Image (cartoon, helix red, strand yellow):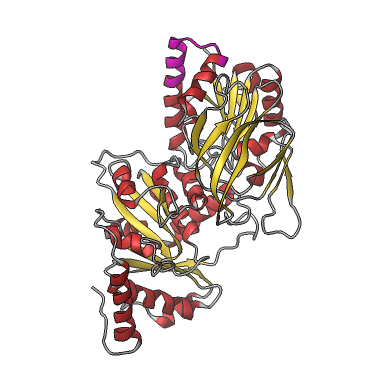
Amino acid sequence: MKRIGLLYIKGSLPAFEDFGNLPTDIIKKNGMVRGIPAHKVLDGVIIPGGSIIESGTITPEIEKEIKKIAEEGGFVLGICSGFQVLGKKTDVGRRSPIPIWKKGIGLLDVKFEPLINNDRVKAKIVGDCFLTKGLINKTIEGFHCHTYGKITTTEKPIFCSILKRTNYKDKRREVISGVSNDDGNVVGTLIHGCLDYNPELVDNIFSFLDLNEKEIIKIKEENKKLKNKIKREIGVDTNIFAKKKEKNSKNTRFLMIAGISSGAGKTFITTGLAGVLRKKGFDVGIAKVGPDVRDITPALYLTKEKMGKYSSIKIGHLGWMELKDVINHMKRKFDIVLIEGVMSILTGMLNEKVPYSAVEIAMAANIPVILVEACNKAGIETATLNLISHAKLLEKLGIKVKGIILNKVYDENIVKRINLSNFNGYVFTMPKVILRERKSTPEVEISLENFSLKALEVVEKNIDINKIIKAAENVKFEGYVPLENLVERVREFIDDYLLGTGTPRYS
């Protein structure tokens, strides 16, 4: 039987997509497959996305085995970060005044530099290789989810993607999104899901491997076993495993983790909650309000769930899927769905586009909310005031604020002096966590295993997960509140609460 390897090392995302249901084996950091050097067992290898380059987890043994597979005529396919692994070097210094170069293994002459894109894409096939044979000028589908998408190369282009938005700005452009070596057996691409959404590419792999129908069935059977094995572990090479799941009716409950400001810690907390829930045996769905799905990648690293079209909730012209369809897709698939907000929960609320904010998403389906604010910039006192005043406004808008999280707390005594016992909801505090400035946020450079496991550890110690489970509720899409109604409710809140002509209450 022909065998296809999937790189399974820290920083990789082995369940981010299905990879055409092709992988039959995993390759770990020692370069071995079932105790045998990978090149002696495998006919091809897939290197998934993630933070492999930033994490620096390609060992000399892995490099040797990948090069051996290529030299001996097997296929090598790198996707996103896996593409960077195959390239010469990547500048991970997006916010650095000078480039910060990380080396790849150099199978492809490609240099990567910062260019953010999170589009669902259509890409034209422009070059021939083992993956694209007979498909020149055809169009494929997939999605981008990267920070380092600017490519400089002397290799043969095979894919060109049409992008609608880059670096947070609407700017249509066509970019090279995949290349091949001269022999046509080593391919790198930025297009996630290229094998899942385009069966003709998978057929070409079958043809390259000269597989008959029985062999194809056998590969899919082996792949199913492999995916079940991979999904049991929380993260990669952690030896942390999910509890055995009890049968249930998939009575899916939803909860939004929303911030008072950018930098409040939504991603860190969502990641930690996802990991703790998965550890308890829950099937956890993750979605992001708006298009920047990079933010939920750390949570998916822990839960081993795919990035689906439902992972991005549309606001205005941004994002992938309408809220109504997201809810319908995720119901009965997951036990609990965590929705990460975007920027401040109120940002965009009064924009003429409806919806254009996390608050409108929550209102449209009566999604309960946990509010988060960081204490490190304006202090614990200001953070508390921000949380309570926002909670009161959200209550005026009809939203259930089930709890608040004071994040990055540097002095618990100050929190005790404030006394939040009268707040009609859960109150959690999270300590200030020391993470190196670099490798700690998707906006700069992230090492998935460091960020995700620290989030899991801190949330597990400081948040009662049973209260989070109780806070989540069944939801139903009811429709968006018209802009004029939002404006009126905000004015009433200002008159009644801020100007003191009335007294709002907690429901």
Q: Is residue 443 left or right of residue 227?
A: right
User: Looking at the image, which residue is at 42% across and 31% down?
Assistant: 228
Q: Is residue 248 above or below residue 396?
A: above
Q: Nearer the viewer, residue 412 or 49?
A: 49
> In the depicted view, which residue is nearer to us: 432 or 117?
117
- The x, y position of residue 377, in whole percent, is 56, 74
Give coordinates of residue 18: x percent, y percent: 46, 32
Is residue 278 among the parts visible in the rendering?
no
At 26% from the left edge and 38% from the top edge, which residue is drawn? 247
- Residue 495 x, y percent position in the rendering: 31, 85
The location of residue 248, given as percent across then percent down, is: 25, 41
Q: Quadrant of residue 505?
A: bottom left
| Left or right: where 332 falls relative to 176 | left
Magenta-highlighted residues: 208-220
Please state the total of marks drawn on the protein image: 0
Residue 168 or residue 234, whichever sits in front = 168
Residue at the image point whose x is 29% and y is 39% from the top: 246
Query: Would residue 475 appear left or right of 88 to someone viewing this image?
Result: left
> Relative to residue 494, is residue 86 depicted above or below?
above
Say if the magenta span includes residue 214: yes
